[in-house]
Image (spheres, coloured by chain):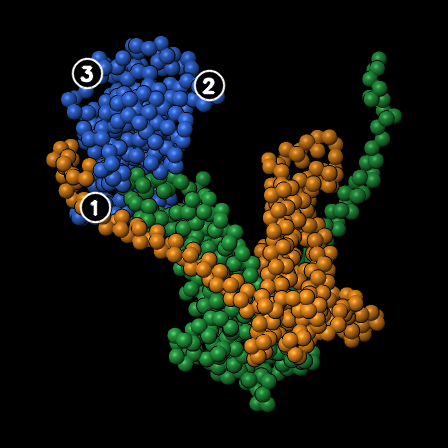
Chain colours: A green, B orange, C blue
Amino acid sequence: MNSDPTRLDSLWSPNRKASKRSESIVRFIFGAFALVSVATTIGIVGTLIFETFEFFQEVPFWNFLTDTQWTPLFKSAKFGIFVLISATMLTSTIAVTVALPLGLFAAICLSEYATPKTRQIIKPLLEVLAGIPSVVFGYFALLFVTPLLQNIVPGLQGFNALSAGLVLGVSITPLIASLSEDAIYAVPRSLRDGSYALGATKRETIISVVLPAALSGIVSSVILAVSRAIGETMIVTLAAGQNPTLGLNPFVPIMTMTAFIVQVSLGDTPAGSLAFKTIFAVGMTLFLITLVLNVFSFWFVRRFREKYD
Amino acid sequence: MNTPNTSDSNTPDGKVNLFQADMASRYRTDGIFQAITWTSIVIALLILAVLIIDVLMDGLPFINWNFLSNFPSRKPEQAGLLSALAGTIWVMVTVAVIAFPLGVGAGIFLEEFAEDNWFARAIEININNLAGVPSIIYGLLGLQVFVRLLGPNGWLFELTGIDITGGRSILTGALTLALLVLPIIIVSTRESLRAVPDSLRLAGFALGATRWQVVHNQILPIAIPGILTGTILALSRAIGETAPLITIGALTFISFLPENLQSPFTVLPIQIYNWVSRPQKDFHDLAAGGIIVLLVVLLVMNSTAVLLRNKLQKRF
Amino acid sequence: MMNESINTVTTPEPALRTENLNVYYGSSLAVRQVNLDIPQNKVVAFIGPSGCGKSTVLRCFNRMNDLIPGARVSGTISFRGENLYAKTVDPVELRRRIGMVFQKPNPFPKSIYENIAFGARINGYKGDMGELVETSLRRAAIWDEVKDKLRESGLALSGGQQQRLCIARAIAISPEIILMDEPCSALDPISTLKVEELIHELKQQYTIVIVTHNMQQASRVSDLTAFYNAEALEGGSKVGYLVEYDRTTSIFHNPAEKATQDYVSGRFG
């Protein structure tokens, strides 16, 4: 009856078993790969907790929080973490002071004023800026910006928070620009039209309607940039110096949390020594600060995002 | 239309008189505002230009064959970055070999195989958080796990006599950097897979193919340009990293070439860091030379990524 | 073909008049040869199938089309006898006097109060802001629903309330004409009814031009109706044109054109 030769059952022998087996093998292996990221997190948290715990066996937690000196490598060691935190905050604050206006205005320009053609030229250039390795920015801060600023700011020392902070700000500007631009770009056209129809100019529309509508995305981009600035290492290590002093003077050498970790790592510190444990305690502090900022940024977007359909 | 000549008629409560929009000053403010936004872009790009010109002016005179083929030296005129260049290539290849399968596999699992349950969401949140962890923290992880636990005289060595990483070695550096860039590869893999239209998957299933057959034969070939682009960008991030490698203790003065994965090593950014942090001007200029080489490597990689994206990408 | 009918229904000075209006997007013609008068204090409905250019013409009246790159017009539109597209006319200033309500409610992500006050403030309103907000909300028949939550976000309102908020926002700056671009298409029937009642109220004080897909709505709210249609050009693009413009009752019960008859009786479109 059936004359179609391709319909003969004998011609079809799919190896269902084999394909099912390879399916589950692939599934298992790739699932295990996905777990690597979980293992990484566990490794980071575990490592930091373990060594930090060891650290606090030797250094009282209270001293860690309240000492006003940071001299872990001296004979009379002092472990006042706020010395390092204040330095990190100083460079990060300078950085955000630079990056926030620069990045936000750049985002507004790209999204609202630049023609598509100009945008196509500027965006890759900003990506180049974002892709410059931090050690290169460190070189620039130490050997170009500092000498330049020394002509303007009397008493500016060779290592200082100002140059480091300024260049750090330049390095996080593309991050703010790109994430804020996404947020601004996503504001629906209908909102802008509503504003124009009331007789608003372009600037009035941007400031009063578009930016408020994009606020959650902008704030989250800034928080992420702050987190990036706090964790940045090479610029502050090279340009801000390695001199742990408590205070907010941007003209003198300071030592950030990350710079301390580098300083100890460069020396030959035996595992198990207090100095070794100290870098993990500092790392833990750094990790917690950036984690809180990242989680806050994530939460902020979800909480305050305006829903437009 | 500039004169409110109609305010007498058809204005129910005479409110028109209450509107005194000063158009001239509003437009002036508009112009100033627009100028400010353009200035921001110009400033950012100007700084980029100044940085590159500064590096070129300082470093270009030092770029020659000796600079590329000599080992580092205490004498600036003899110093080169051969070992750093070799180390960077070793590390980059090793990172690619480790991170590419891991990242792409994890990306495929999360996008194509995982059901939308708490487990998949937890992994996703976890990856998002990892992307925000400072790179130096990865260095601490590498120091503890790869140098201490899995290295010589480590925990595993005491138990079994096996030294996996060789301590402060290329393998340790590559593993550390691989973990650092893994989130980037996973995310770009997922985005590339997501961009493939579902109709192709359904067509495959309708022919009786298993999920893996569909992904392997239909989806991956289309997604691969995007995945490769993301991987190259991740690698260029990795070879610019300095802090995690310093933390695991990559040496800065290496006057030999790596022989295997367990060899000690240095890389371009560390060599640059080393030269910048010396007081002598000559070494600073060498650093600028090193930066030029590093930037050229990055430029080549990024252009490859862009070319790949433009050439191979099929549009749907 | 329309001059006779227009003379029978218009007052001497129309609020808006178009003469040989053509609208182009880039090089392609979107709407051709529109001639009509919109009399003061009337509601004029624009009806027609999709792509017939009724919204395009509407958006010329407050020069919203200026915001679309490549859009341009030829012919003239006069607003109280003055050319809308004259060089001396500032579109930003013009939009204060010709307000617009959009298809989808688009309240700003601000408080209800600020949604109303925004337009007044940028346009240099010198009167009492609180009073203006209240009057506008009252006129838009939404005051009772929102008077206790003026500080809450406009986005927290229901769709129908949002649209009336947008109408309140438009009338707060005392426009002479209100353009409505399918204001009810995103609303449920009850909200639609409320907006239609509101249009009846507003007619006392404003000239209203409303684009609608809904023929019942056109027949309910408008005094005059303009029927647009589209014809295909070579190359697949469509160009819209005005078929017939007359009293709403005539359009719906005794249209002059066969196409209008077909459309209003639901035979196409």
Q: Which amino acid does label 2 sit on?
A: Glu
According to the picture, the residue beneath numbered tag 3 turns out to be C7
Q: Which mark is residue C234?
A: 2
Location of the C terminus of chain C by quadrant is top left
Circles 3 and 1: CB atoms closer than 8 Å: no
Whether residue A113 is visible: yes
Q: Quadrant of residue C36?
A: top left
Indicate whether B246 appears above or below C97.
Answer: below
Location of the N terminus of chain C by quadrant is top left
Direction bottom: furthest residue? A75
Mark 1: which secondary structure?
loop
Give residue B263's position: percent from left, percent from top: 76, 70
Direction left: furthest residue? B8
Q: Residue B21 carries which label?
A: 1
What chain letter is assigned to the residue under label 1? B
Q: What residue type is labelled 3?
A: Asn
Observer-side mark, 2 or 3, equals 2
Alpha-carbon span between mark 2 and mark 3: 36 Å
Q: In which quarter of the image is residue A191?
A: top left
Give residue B315's position: percent from left, percent from top: 60, 37
Depth check: give the residue in front, C234 or A233.
C234
